Image: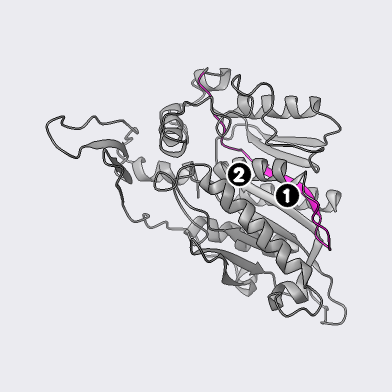
Amino acid sequence: MNFPSCANFRSKAKQKAEIIMGDTGSSVSLAVDFNGVIKLYSDGSVVREDEPAVHLPPLSESYEQVVYKDIVYNHTFGLWTRVYLPPPRPNSSPATSTRLPVILYFHGGGFCLFSPQSADVHRLCVKCAADIGAVIVSVRYRLAPEDRLPAAYHDSVSALQWLHSQSKTTGGGERADPWFDSHADFSKVFLMGESAGGNIAHRLGMWSARQDWGGDMRIRGLILLYPFFGGEMRTVSETIESQETPALTVQDSDLMWRLALPTGSNRDHHFCNPLSPQTGALDVWSLGGPLPPTVMVIGALDILRSRQLEYCELLNKCGEQIIEVVEFQDQDHGFDDMDEQKTIKVIECVSNFIKSAS
Protein backbone atom coordinates (compact mmCIF):
# COMPACT_ATOMS: atom_id res chain seq x y z
CA MET A 1 0.00 0.00 0.00
CA ASN A 2 2.78 2.38 0.91
CA PHE A 3 6.27 2.36 2.38
CA PRO A 4 5.74 -0.58 4.76
CA SER A 5 5.03 -2.64 1.68
CA CYS A 6 8.19 -1.22 0.13
CA ALA A 7 9.99 -2.43 3.21
CA ASN A 8 8.83 -5.94 2.38
CA PHE A 9 10.90 -5.79 -0.81
CA ARG A 10 14.07 -5.49 1.25
CA SER A 11 13.15 -6.91 4.66
CA LYS A 12 15.48 -9.92 4.69
CA ALA A 13 18.40 -8.44 2.84
CA LYS A 14 17.93 -5.03 4.52
CA GLN A 15 18.72 -3.40 1.22
CA LYS A 16 18.75 0.36 0.97
CA ALA A 17 17.50 2.41 -1.96
CA GLU A 18 20.46 3.73 -3.88
CA ILE A 19 21.23 5.80 -6.91
CA ILE A 20 23.36 3.92 -9.39
CA MET A 21 25.41 5.84 -11.91
CA GLY A 22 25.50 4.04 -15.19
CA ASP A 23 28.49 3.25 -17.39
CA THR A 24 29.30 6.48 -19.20
CA GLY A 25 30.41 4.47 -22.18
CA SER A 26 26.95 2.97 -22.83
CA SER A 27 24.25 4.76 -24.79
CA VAL A 28 21.57 3.97 -22.22
CA SER A 29 22.51 3.64 -18.58
CA LEU A 30 20.72 2.85 -15.37
CA ALA A 31 20.02 6.16 -13.61
CA VAL A 32 17.95 5.18 -10.59
CA ASP A 33 17.28 1.78 -9.01
CA PHE A 34 14.73 1.50 -6.22
CA ASN A 35 15.45 -1.90 -4.67
CA GLY A 36 15.12 -3.53 -8.06
CA VAL A 37 11.38 -2.76 -8.08
CA ILE A 38 11.61 0.35 -10.25
CA LYS A 39 14.52 0.99 -12.61
CA LEU A 40 14.75 4.34 -14.38
CA TYR A 41 17.16 4.59 -17.32
CA SER A 42 18.95 7.59 -18.74
CA ASP A 43 16.66 7.74 -21.78
CA GLY A 44 13.60 8.03 -19.51
CA SER A 45 12.44 4.44 -19.94
CA VAL A 46 11.19 2.58 -16.87
CA VAL A 47 11.26 -1.12 -16.01
CA ARG A 48 9.03 -2.34 -13.20
CA GLU A 49 8.99 -5.66 -11.39
CA ASP A 50 5.65 -7.26 -10.52
CA GLU A 51 4.31 -6.48 -7.08
CA PRO A 52 5.50 -9.14 -4.65
CA ALA A 53 2.95 -11.53 -3.24
CA VAL A 54 1.59 -10.28 0.08
CA HIS A 55 0.49 -12.99 2.48
CA LEU A 56 -2.29 -11.63 4.66
CA PRO A 57 -4.46 -13.50 7.16
CA PRO A 58 -7.95 -14.30 5.86
CA LEU A 59 -10.69 -11.83 6.63
CA SER A 60 -13.53 -12.88 8.88
CA GLU A 61 -16.83 -13.98 7.38
CA SER A 62 -18.48 -10.61 8.02
CA TYR A 63 -16.08 -8.90 5.60
CA GLU A 64 -16.88 -11.39 2.86
CA GLN A 65 -20.27 -9.71 2.51
CA VAL A 66 -18.67 -6.50 1.23
CA VAL A 67 -19.17 -6.26 -2.54
CA TYR A 68 -17.06 -4.25 -4.95
CA LYS A 69 -16.71 -3.42 -8.61
CA ASP A 70 -14.43 -1.33 -10.85
CA ILE A 71 -15.76 1.74 -12.69
CA VAL A 72 -13.79 3.85 -15.20
CA TYR A 73 -13.72 7.54 -14.33
CA ASN A 74 -11.23 8.79 -16.91
CA HIS A 75 -11.35 7.18 -20.33
CA THR A 76 -8.49 9.27 -21.71
CA PHE A 77 -5.95 7.62 -19.42
CA GLY A 78 -7.89 4.43 -18.67
CA LEU A 79 -8.21 5.28 -14.99
CA TRP A 80 -10.72 3.59 -12.74
CA THR A 81 -12.08 3.42 -9.25
CA ARG A 82 -12.84 0.38 -7.15
CA VAL A 83 -16.15 1.00 -5.39
CA TYR A 84 -17.00 -0.92 -2.21
CA LEU A 85 -20.47 -1.37 -0.77
CA PRO A 86 -20.93 -2.69 2.79
CA PRO A 87 -23.51 -5.34 3.63
CA PRO A 88 -26.93 -4.12 4.79
CA ARG A 89 -27.25 -3.44 8.49
CA PRO A 90 -29.20 -6.03 10.51
CA ASN A 91 -32.97 -5.61 10.34
CA SER A 92 -32.74 -3.07 7.54
CA SER A 93 -34.84 -3.12 4.37
CA PRO A 94 -34.73 -1.14 1.12
CA ALA A 95 -37.51 1.06 2.48
CA THR A 96 -35.76 1.83 5.76
CA SER A 97 -32.08 1.69 4.82
CA THR A 98 -30.05 4.84 5.51
CA ARG A 99 -27.87 6.36 2.83
CA LEU A 100 -24.16 6.00 3.47
CA PRO A 101 -21.33 8.53 3.59
CA VAL A 102 -18.88 8.39 0.68
CA ILE A 103 -15.09 8.17 1.16
CA LEU A 104 -12.91 9.06 -1.83
CA TYR A 105 -9.72 7.16 -0.96
CA PHE A 106 -6.16 7.53 -2.30
CA HIS A 107 -3.61 4.78 -1.63
CA GLY A 108 0.02 5.26 -0.63
CA GLY A 109 3.26 4.16 -2.25
CA GLY A 110 5.39 7.28 -2.65
CA PHE A 111 3.49 8.25 -5.84
CA CYS A 112 5.37 5.39 -7.50
CA LEU A 113 3.78 2.14 -6.37
CA PHE A 114 0.53 0.21 -5.97
CA SER A 115 -3.08 0.56 -7.05
CA PRO A 116 -6.58 -0.13 -5.68
CA GLN A 117 -6.15 -3.80 -6.56
CA SER A 118 -2.97 -4.20 -4.48
CA ALA A 119 -3.71 -6.75 -1.77
CA ASP A 120 -3.29 -4.55 1.29
CA VAL A 121 -5.03 -1.56 -0.32
CA HIS A 122 -7.99 -3.75 -1.19
CA ARG A 123 -8.06 -5.28 2.28
CA LEU A 124 -8.12 -1.89 4.03
CA CYS A 125 -10.97 -0.67 1.83
CA VAL A 126 -13.02 -3.79 2.54
CA LYS A 127 -12.56 -3.27 6.27
CA CYS A 128 -13.39 0.43 6.08
CA ALA A 129 -16.56 -0.21 4.10
CA ALA A 130 -17.79 -2.79 6.60
CA ASP A 131 -16.64 -1.22 9.86
CA ILE A 132 -17.47 2.40 9.06
CA GLY A 133 -20.57 1.68 7.04
CA ALA A 134 -19.57 3.78 4.04
CA VAL A 135 -19.30 3.64 0.27
CA ILE A 136 -15.54 3.54 -0.41
CA VAL A 137 -14.28 4.83 -3.76
CA SER A 138 -10.64 3.79 -4.14
CA VAL A 139 -8.89 5.74 -6.90
CA ARG A 140 -6.40 4.46 -9.46
CA TYR A 141 -4.11 7.36 -10.36
CA ARG A 142 -1.08 7.61 -12.63
CA LEU A 143 2.26 6.72 -11.09
CA ALA A 144 5.73 8.19 -11.29
CA PRO A 145 8.27 8.13 -12.77
CA GLU A 146 6.33 7.35 -15.97
CA ASP A 147 3.92 10.16 -15.06
CA ARG A 148 5.51 12.58 -12.65
CA LEU A 149 3.61 15.01 -10.48
CA PRO A 150 1.29 16.82 -10.98
CA ALA A 151 -0.26 13.88 -12.89
CA ALA A 152 -1.61 12.24 -9.72
CA TYR A 153 -3.08 15.56 -8.55
CA HIS A 154 -4.81 16.07 -11.87
CA ASP A 155 -6.22 12.55 -11.64
CA SER A 156 -7.56 13.26 -8.14
CA VAL A 157 -9.41 16.29 -9.49
CA SER A 158 -10.77 14.18 -12.34
CA ALA A 159 -11.96 11.54 -9.86
CA LEU A 160 -13.70 14.10 -7.66
CA GLN A 161 -15.37 15.71 -10.67
CA TRP A 162 -16.56 12.29 -11.81
CA LEU A 163 -17.93 11.62 -8.34
CA HIS A 164 -19.76 14.93 -8.50
CA SER A 165 -21.27 13.90 -11.84
CA GLN A 166 -22.65 10.81 -10.12
CA SER A 167 -24.26 12.94 -7.42
CA LYS A 168 -26.05 15.22 -9.86
CA THR A 169 -28.28 12.43 -11.06
CA THR A 170 -28.61 10.47 -7.83
CA GLY A 171 -32.28 9.80 -7.18
CA GLY A 172 -33.35 8.43 -10.55
CA GLY A 173 -31.06 9.93 -13.19
CA GLU A 174 -29.80 7.79 -16.03
CA ARG A 175 -26.09 8.46 -15.61
CA ALA A 176 -25.63 7.64 -11.94
CA ASP A 177 -24.32 4.19 -11.19
CA PRO A 178 -27.03 2.17 -9.41
CA TRP A 179 -24.87 1.71 -6.30
CA PHE A 180 -24.53 5.47 -5.89
CA ASP A 181 -28.15 6.02 -6.83
CA SER A 182 -29.41 3.63 -4.18
CA HIS A 183 -26.91 3.95 -1.33
CA ALA A 184 -24.73 7.09 -1.43
CA ASP A 185 -25.29 10.21 0.64
CA PHE A 186 -23.43 12.84 -1.35
CA SER A 187 -23.98 15.44 1.33
CA LYS A 188 -21.38 13.48 3.34
CA VAL A 189 -18.26 13.10 1.16
CA PHE A 190 -14.84 12.67 2.77
CA LEU A 191 -11.39 12.80 1.16
CA MET A 192 -9.06 10.20 2.65
CA GLY A 193 -5.53 9.11 1.87
CA GLU A 194 -2.50 7.55 3.47
CA SER A 195 1.13 8.47 2.93
CA ALA A 196 1.33 9.72 -0.68
CA GLY A 197 -2.44 9.42 -0.78
CA GLY A 198 -2.60 11.72 2.25
CA ASN A 199 -0.54 14.26 0.31
CA ILE A 200 -3.02 13.95 -2.57
CA ALA A 201 -6.02 14.34 -0.26
CA HIS A 202 -4.41 17.45 1.27
CA ARG A 203 -3.98 19.12 -2.12
CA LEU A 204 -7.38 18.02 -3.37
CA GLY A 205 -8.94 19.48 -0.22
CA MET A 206 -7.13 22.77 -0.88
CA TRP A 207 -8.38 22.84 -4.46
CA SER A 208 -11.94 21.82 -3.65
CA ALA A 209 -12.29 24.52 -0.98
CA ARG A 210 -12.81 27.13 -3.70
CA GLN A 211 -15.22 25.09 -5.81
CA ASP A 212 -18.95 25.71 -5.90
CA TRP A 213 -20.15 22.18 -6.34
CA GLY A 214 -23.85 22.84 -6.50
CA GLY A 215 -26.33 20.00 -6.29
CA ASP A 216 -26.17 17.59 -3.39
CA MET A 217 -22.43 17.04 -2.96
CA ARG A 218 -20.71 18.43 0.13
CA ILE A 219 -17.15 17.66 1.25
CA ARG A 220 -17.41 17.25 5.01
CA GLY A 221 -13.85 16.41 5.99
CA LEU A 222 -10.28 15.40 5.19
CA ILE A 223 -8.75 12.23 6.64
CA LEU A 224 -4.95 12.31 6.37
CA LEU A 225 -3.10 9.20 7.48
CA TYR A 226 0.62 10.00 7.99
CA PRO A 227 0.80 12.12 4.80
CA PHE A 228 3.97 11.98 2.73
CA PHE A 229 5.79 15.33 2.83
CA GLY A 230 9.44 16.25 2.49
CA GLY A 231 11.94 19.10 2.24
CA GLU A 232 15.59 19.91 1.74
CA MET A 233 16.30 20.86 5.36
CA ARG A 234 16.18 17.89 7.73
CA THR A 235 13.69 17.98 10.57
CA VAL A 236 14.15 16.66 14.10
CA SER A 237 12.29 13.43 13.40
CA GLU A 238 14.37 12.83 10.26
CA THR A 239 17.65 13.17 12.10
CA ILE A 240 16.86 11.20 15.27
CA GLU A 241 17.31 7.45 14.85
CA SER A 242 14.30 6.29 16.84
CA GLN A 243 14.66 2.66 15.79
CA GLU A 244 17.11 0.35 14.05
CA THR A 245 15.06 -0.45 10.94
CA PRO A 246 12.38 2.20 10.31
CA ALA A 247 9.58 1.32 7.91
CA LEU A 248 10.39 4.44 5.92
CA THR A 249 14.00 5.60 5.79
CA VAL A 250 15.19 9.07 4.87
CA GLN A 251 17.03 7.53 1.91
CA ASP A 252 13.87 5.86 0.58
CA SER A 253 11.86 9.03 1.07
CA ASP A 254 14.40 11.12 -0.82
CA LEU A 255 14.55 8.62 -3.66
CA MET A 256 10.76 8.46 -4.01
CA TRP A 257 10.67 12.24 -4.30
CA ARG A 258 13.45 12.10 -6.90
CA LEU A 259 11.26 9.78 -8.96
CA ALA A 260 8.01 11.68 -8.40
CA LEU A 261 8.83 15.40 -8.59
CA PRO A 262 9.05 17.29 -11.89
CA THR A 263 12.47 16.79 -13.45
CA GLY A 264 14.98 19.27 -12.08
CA SER A 265 13.00 20.04 -8.91
CA ASN A 266 14.33 19.63 -5.40
CA ARG A 267 12.43 18.65 -2.27
CA ASP A 268 11.42 22.21 -1.52
CA HIS A 269 9.04 22.09 -4.47
CA HIS A 270 5.58 22.78 -3.07
CA PHE A 271 4.33 19.36 -4.19
CA CYS A 272 6.71 17.90 -1.63
CA ASN A 273 7.00 20.65 0.97
CA PRO A 274 3.72 22.49 1.71
CA LEU A 275 5.74 24.79 4.01
CA SER A 276 8.31 25.48 1.33
CA PRO A 277 10.36 28.66 1.63
CA GLN A 278 10.07 28.85 -2.17
CA THR A 279 6.32 29.41 -1.95
CA GLY A 280 6.08 31.27 1.34
CA ALA A 281 4.15 29.85 4.30
CA LEU A 282 1.57 27.22 3.44
CA ASP A 283 1.09 26.31 -0.21
CA VAL A 284 -2.66 26.64 -0.37
CA TRP A 285 -2.96 25.79 -4.07
CA SER A 286 -5.45 28.61 -4.66
CA LEU A 287 -7.18 28.05 -1.34
CA GLY A 288 -10.34 30.14 -1.44
CA GLY A 289 -11.67 29.45 2.04
CA PRO A 290 -11.20 27.32 5.12
CA LEU A 291 -10.74 23.62 4.67
CA PRO A 292 -13.41 21.27 5.97
CA PRO A 293 -12.69 19.66 9.35
CA THR A 294 -9.50 17.61 9.17
CA VAL A 295 -8.08 14.70 11.15
CA MET A 296 -4.44 13.71 10.86
CA VAL A 297 -3.19 10.34 12.13
CA ILE A 298 0.51 10.26 12.99
CA GLY A 299 2.93 7.58 14.15
CA ALA A 300 5.21 8.89 16.91
CA LEU A 301 8.23 7.08 15.39
CA ASP A 302 7.57 8.19 11.81
CA ILE A 303 10.48 10.13 10.33
CA LEU A 304 7.85 12.48 8.84
CA ARG A 305 6.27 13.30 12.22
CA SER A 306 7.88 16.76 12.52
CA ARG A 307 6.70 17.80 9.07
CA GLN A 308 3.19 16.56 9.72
CA LEU A 309 2.94 18.47 13.01
CA GLU A 310 4.33 21.64 11.41
CA TYR A 311 1.67 21.36 8.71
CA CYS A 312 -1.05 21.09 11.36
CA GLU A 313 0.32 24.07 13.29
CA LEU A 314 0.41 26.30 10.25
CA LEU A 315 -3.06 25.20 9.13
CA ASN A 316 -4.37 26.36 12.48
CA LYS A 317 -2.93 29.81 11.76
CA CYS A 318 -4.57 30.07 8.33
CA GLY A 319 -8.07 30.80 9.57
CA GLU A 320 -10.97 29.04 11.16
CA GLN A 321 -9.58 25.57 10.69
CA ILE A 322 -10.72 22.55 12.66
CA ILE A 323 -7.89 20.04 12.74
CA GLU A 324 -7.59 17.06 15.06
CA VAL A 325 -4.27 15.27 15.55
CA VAL A 326 -4.31 11.64 16.65
CA GLU A 327 -0.85 10.35 17.50
CA PHE A 328 -0.11 6.68 18.05
CA GLN A 329 2.82 6.18 20.41
CA ASP A 330 5.63 3.77 19.51
CA GLN A 331 4.32 3.47 15.94
CA ASP A 332 6.06 4.04 12.62
CA HIS A 333 5.00 5.17 9.17
CA GLY A 334 2.24 2.93 7.86
CA PHE A 335 1.88 1.17 11.20
CA ASP A 336 -1.72 0.16 10.56
CA ASP A 337 -0.65 -1.90 7.53
CA MET A 338 1.43 -4.20 9.70
CA ASP A 339 -0.79 -4.72 12.74
CA GLU A 340 -4.41 -5.84 12.58
CA GLN A 341 -5.22 -4.36 15.99
CA LYS A 342 -3.77 -1.02 14.95
CA THR A 343 -5.82 -1.16 11.75
CA ILE A 344 -8.95 -1.55 13.86
CA LYS A 345 -7.99 1.44 16.02
CA VAL A 346 -7.30 3.64 13.00
CA ILE A 347 -10.63 2.68 11.43
CA GLU A 348 -12.36 3.48 14.73
CA CYS A 349 -10.68 6.87 14.70
CA VAL A 350 -11.85 7.50 11.13
CA SER A 351 -15.37 6.32 11.94
CA ASN A 352 -15.63 8.62 14.95
CA PHE A 353 -14.38 11.56 12.90
CA ILE A 354 -16.95 10.93 10.16
CA LYS A 355 -19.75 10.82 12.72
CA SER A 356 -18.62 14.08 14.31
CA ALA A 357 -18.16 15.87 10.97
CA SER A 358 -21.39 14.68 9.33
Residue density around tag 1, few if under 14, some if 14–19, many if 20 or more, within 10 Å: many
Which residue is under mark 2? 200
Q: Residues within 10 Å of mark 2 (few under 14, many from 20)?
A: many
Q: Residue at x 58, y 49 (%)?
A: 154
User: Which label sits on residue 59?
Assistant: none
Q: Is residue 220 magenta?
A: yes
For disc 1, the marked residue is 350
Q: Residue 133: image x %, image y %?
A: 74, 64
Q: Image check: 299 left or right of 242?
A: right
Q: Look at the numbered disc 2 and give the secondary structure of its residue.
A: helix
The x, y position of residue 137, in whole percent, is 64, 62
For the magenta stretch, what is the residue range?
Answer: 212-232
- Is 157 or 231 nearer to us in this picture? 157
Q: Is residue 268 left or right of residue 312?
A: left
Please identify the quarter of the rendering in which residue 43 is found. top left
Residue 298 position in % (x across, y down): 65, 35
Disc 2 + disc 1, Cβ < 8 Å: no
What residue type is disc 2 on? Ile
